[in-house]
Amino acid sequence: MAVVIVTGSCGLIGAETVRFYISKGFDVVGVDNNMRSYFFGEEASTHWSQLKLESDFANYTHASIDIRDEKAVDELFAKYSTDISAVIHTAAQPSHDWAAREPITDFSVNAGGTLVLLEATRKHCPEAAFLFTSTNKVYGDTPNFLPLVEQETRWELDPAHPFAEHGIDETMSIDRCTHSLFGVSKAAADLLVQEYGRYFNMNTGVFRGGCLTGGGHSGTELHGFLSYLARCCMTGRHYSIFGYKGKQVRDNIHSSDLVNMLWHFHQAPRPGEVYNVGGSRHSNCSMLEAIHMCEEYTGKKMDYTYKEDNRIGDHIWYISDVRKFQSHYPDWKYTYDIKAIIQEVIEGWRARDVKQG
């Protein structure tokens, strides 16, 4: 039986990947030691997700391994060897702010852990597809120097700019800008994955995500803004907007749409390739627009305040151009827009019986 290894298997994208690949008939080995609870506290724990995956799927095997542990990772890969069809690497430290608190931990997880996984793949299953969920933060604050126009509820790009119609493509430089330490650690991992594809001709692919979300997201203040926003609106918990008048724009892609991208790449890999992935012009919103939609769908008013200081490396306007991926894999299509995503996120919290905060 073909095996797929999924790191960060209990997180949003990881768990979606597990479910998808099991539906395709694969045995799935999930690698996740619940570091999310270390990063963001017990309320961000993904242990509930592990229990659900183990309960729901007989052909899911959980391995509570730290991806930085070379010996443990090597032993796991040696066990399954060339039966491994794909390694889908979603594990990460995902927060700007947290990275500044513990830079060495952040870099060792994001960059060092990725290198450990790449080497294990090269050693034990070099023909496997290696798919990495990178981030648009590798572009640093370069998007903030685009010619932006302030509108009533959002910032928008000057219509005359080449990125205006479809969004930011992969030609944007990752150099000569401020990234945040998180952006740097992910950029290092991003380049490593590209290099293993180009130098060793491995089937590696890099997916530079914008805001990834869905009903299974355990959003917190430091990561997962749409999920956390919905939770605050539902529970009456106070929410803080950081900078840019609350008009900063993000494109949001549902986790299942992203996982379907990974599946298409897995079927026909293009070694060392890089793709921007996000909601594009199909699915995006500003912070103020997201608050309005959450209020509309919950029937509750949001308790929030505005703080003038933005987070370092944060984007004012970011919409992904996904046409490169669509040109390589024309059968891939979106199934969720922003309204459907927000409704599902709210229902996801309700299903977990989220309490007053």
Image (cartoon, rainbow, N blue to C red):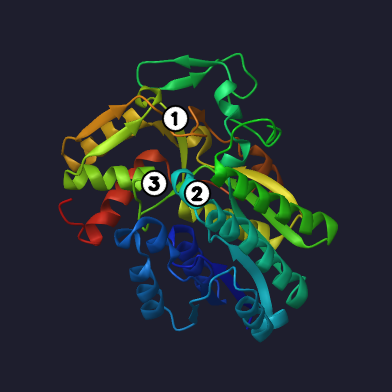
Secondary-structure class at tag 1: strand
- Where residue 343 sits: x, y (%)? 30, 46
**If you read the primary sequence from the N terminus, does the residue marked by circle 3 or circle 2 appear first?**
2
- Where residue 102 sits: x, y (%)? 49, 53
Nearer the observer: mark 1 or 3; the answer is 3
Residue 239 appears left or right of 109: left
- Residue 99: image tag: 2
Q: Give me the C-alpha separation between circle 1 and circle 3.
A: 17 Å
Looking at the rendered structure, the kind of residue marked 1 is: Val
- Residue 293: image tag: none
Residue at the extreme bottom of the image, as rendered = 79
- Where residue 84 sits: x, y (%)? 67, 76
Report the quarter where the N terminus lies: bottom right
> Residue visible at 22% across and 36% down?
295
**If you read the primary sequence from the N terminus, does the residue marked by circle 2 or circle 1 appear first?**
2
Secondary-structure class at tag 2: helix
Residue 78 appears left or right of 12: right
> Residue visible at 58% across and 28% down?
143
Q: Mark 3 points at which residue?
A: 222
Residue 166 in view in this figure: no
Q: Name the residue under label 1.
A: 249
Looking at the picture, does residue 169 appear above or below residue 29?
A: above
- Where residue 214 sits: x, y (%)? 39, 52
Q: In front here: 270 or 340?
A: 270
Looking at the rendered structure, the kind of residue marked 3 is: Leu
Q: Residues within 10 Å of mark 2 (few under 14, many from 20)?
A: many
Residue 223 appears left or right of 168: left
Looking at the rendered structure, the kind of residue marked 2 is: Ala
Q: Give me the C-alpha separation between circle 3 and circle 2.
A: 10 Å
Q: Give me the C-alpha separation between circle 2 and circle 1.
A: 23 Å
Nearer the observer: mark 3 or 2; the answer is 2
Secondary-structure class at tag 3: loop
